[in-house]
Image (cartoon, grey):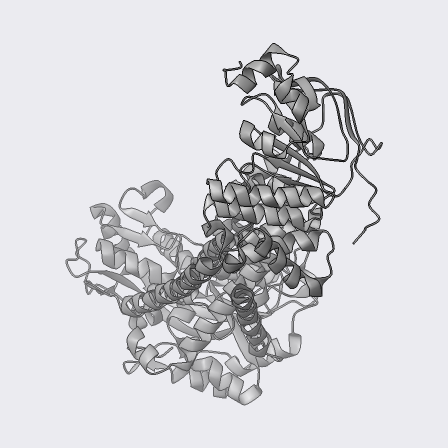
Amino acid sequence: MLNRRLFAAIAAFAMIAVSGIPAMAQDKSIVVASTTSTQDSGLFDYLLPIFKEKTGIAVKVIAQGTGQALDTARRGDADVVFVHAKAQELKFLEEGYGVKRFDVMYNDFVLIGPKSDPAGIAGTKDIAAALVAIKDKKAPFVSRGDRSGTHSAELNLWKAAGVDIDAAKGDWYRAIGQGMGAALNTAAAMDAYVLSDRGTWISFKNRGDLQIEVEGDKRLFNQYGVMLVNPEKHPTVKVDLGQAFIDFLISPEGQKTISEYKIDGKQLFFPDAKPERS
Amino acid sequence: MPESVDAWQLIAGGDATLFAIVRLSLAVSLSAVAIAVLVGLPLGALLALTRFPGRSAMIVVLNGFMGLPPVVVGLTVYLLLSRSGPLGEFGLLFTPAAMVIAQALLVLPIIAALARQTIEDLWSEYRDELTAMGVSPAGRVATLLWDSRFSLVTALLAGFGRAAAEVGTVMIVGGNIEGFTRTMTTTIALETSKGNLPLAMGLGIILIGIIIAINAAAWGLRLWSERRAG
Amino acid sequence: MMRATPSDLPLALDGVCLRIGSTTVLDRLDLTITPGAPTLVVGPNGSGKTTLLRLCMQLVRPTEGRMSWGGRADAGQGRRAILFQKPVMLRRSAAANVCYALAQIGYPRHLRAACTHELLDRVGLADLAARPARHLSGGEQQRVALARALARQPEILLLDEPTASLDPAATLHVEEIIRTAAQSGTKIVMASHDLGQVRRLAGDVVFMVRGRVCEQATAVDFFDRPSTPEAAAFIRGDLVL
């Protein structure tokens, strides 16, 4: 009967489809909890195939905000964390969840804003003064609001500018609780200011009327660190493979590879691993 | 996925990454529907044909669960499958299997609730005849399932549509890992966050096209075979 | 083909009442159905004919009184079949509907196709065997249901106004099938309010009014010497309330 055949076909289709899943699994693989800014900048798309070529290890990247990435690692669901919020990272180490932290690279944050520049800060170099101007003009500002590394950096900058953002925030301050790309999309749609890492900004395609307003301030420095999750907390951590990834990142070869990642001829990340393994 | 290409170029060029993503999406959603059918149809039949204390409450809950928020299901499965969770030892988090489990949970109430309704309606029609013919309980279930197969296919498609279209659970429990757990919907979310709106939109159109094609095929087969079987 | 199933006859009702809520559908029925010529259950609409047939099929149970089938209080899966006034076709072909009934009595699988064909041929539907049963006309569905009932090789065949929706030619055909079944030993219990049909088929008559058996007699006695004024009025064609 035809209907039996139809049902058999549907069932067979499902089974063939399922059979494809194990084939995609990797024997040698690690899970790296990292940040949306690293993923959205395209660095992993460039870096990981090179690492796999060299070692045969597949790296599965979970891109989350730094806070969430550290939580994923705390739960034992990642082998390595690769994030950029030093204070949070040190707390993670203190709690015993990480083995050791290594500096890997840095890029910098840039303050993005609309070409109309209602706060009148375009081209200035003092990020603190720029933020004060935005607050005083109540110019629209998009905050990540997601405990990410960029969010932490933003909060630190408000502090450095002497602004108590919890008290000062109003309609003009929009905390969206999403990733870097989403924040840029939102800023483009609202003609708002937003703090972004340079890598995501360079590779971002939906810029609308946005441009860089403030850059080059030392306080915009954005350090990335990498840590192996402590196998004493979570015995399932793949110590050898995870350490191999970390060793690669801080090796001269890995550092050179990072420095060679460019978009439109612009270098996005600047390696700064310390030879003695800080 | 390469930059500065649009979705049509990807299709026309037979882009391998794109096909891997489409394949994974279909594999995950179809497997989830298959599991939900295996559990949901018997569950629906049981609720339709038996009377026990708490049955009404169960039906209300089941009907309500048709609208389960995907993020909540995702979070629940995440906490269950996490290394720190009760099922952590299996190491399923951030794998396709986790996505199948989460989507199956999402789809199960839809299939069970619609099957319950369909089978109960048909049972009220068939009750006298089947009882008079002395059909055993198992025979009743088989007969009702077979004779309501056209309506059940609609339930199945509703379930598949929900699974294929959702992003909340697969993002949380799959982790959107490139080449491993990246599906159509998580790719669209990712490309959107990269500001690559044309590519995201193009992928969205492909996804809608696939869902419509599957529904059209099922609908055509249904019309054709219904004409033959009544 | 004899099966081990014990006989359901005589089928006895002893003080049977059926109440649904505060409504009394059947009121103190005392009735014995014995092997032999067809028993016709007659009476106006709402007199309880259908419910009586459903009781005999054990689709409903009495709220008071006792029933027995061949002396047993529980009929089990006996050799009974029923043709409902509005039969429900399974969503399959006419042949598959008949075949389904054969499967239920455990008829040997390899003989089912031939038997199905024979049964459909008996009810004059051999040409429509492959058609979806639900797409057949009301009269055709009635005859598929009759074939389905006969497939059970019933000892008792309960029929609820089987010719109500048929034209005279089809009615004649169905009555012929019923008569043949009766002659080959099947006990026919049939509800009807067509007095002509009762005259043509009945061996004895159960006359019901408002949920009670008003009169039970042989067909000859019922028509020639009705013992109650209601029966007399019904036979004359007067309205019986």
Residue lying at 82% horizontally and 31% vertically, measured from the top left: C73
Q: Is residue C46 left or right of residue A137?
A: right
Q: In terms of depth relative to the viewer, which is nearer, B101 or A127?
A: B101
Q: In terms of depth relative to the viewer, which is nearer, A276 or A213?
A: A213
- Quadrant including the C terminus of chain A: bottom right
Q: Is residue C15 left or right of residue C197?
A: right
- Marker count (numbered): 0
Taking the view exactly as shown, the residue that stands out farthest to the left is A116
Q: Is residue B214 left or right of residue C130?
A: left
Q: Is residue C170 left or right of residue B132?
A: left
Residue lying at 35% horizontally and 41% vertically, measured from the top left: A167
Across and down, in percent, residue B144 comes to 59, 49
Across and down, in percent, residue C6 comes to 84, 42
Taking the image as drawn, is residue B130 in sight? no
Q: In terms of depth relative to the viewer, which is nearer, A259 or B47?
A: B47
Taking the view exactly as shown, the residue that stands out farthest to the top is C229
Taking the image as drawn, is residue C75 in sight? yes
Across and down, in percent, residue B227 comes to 44, 58
- Quadrant including the N terminus of chain A: bottom right
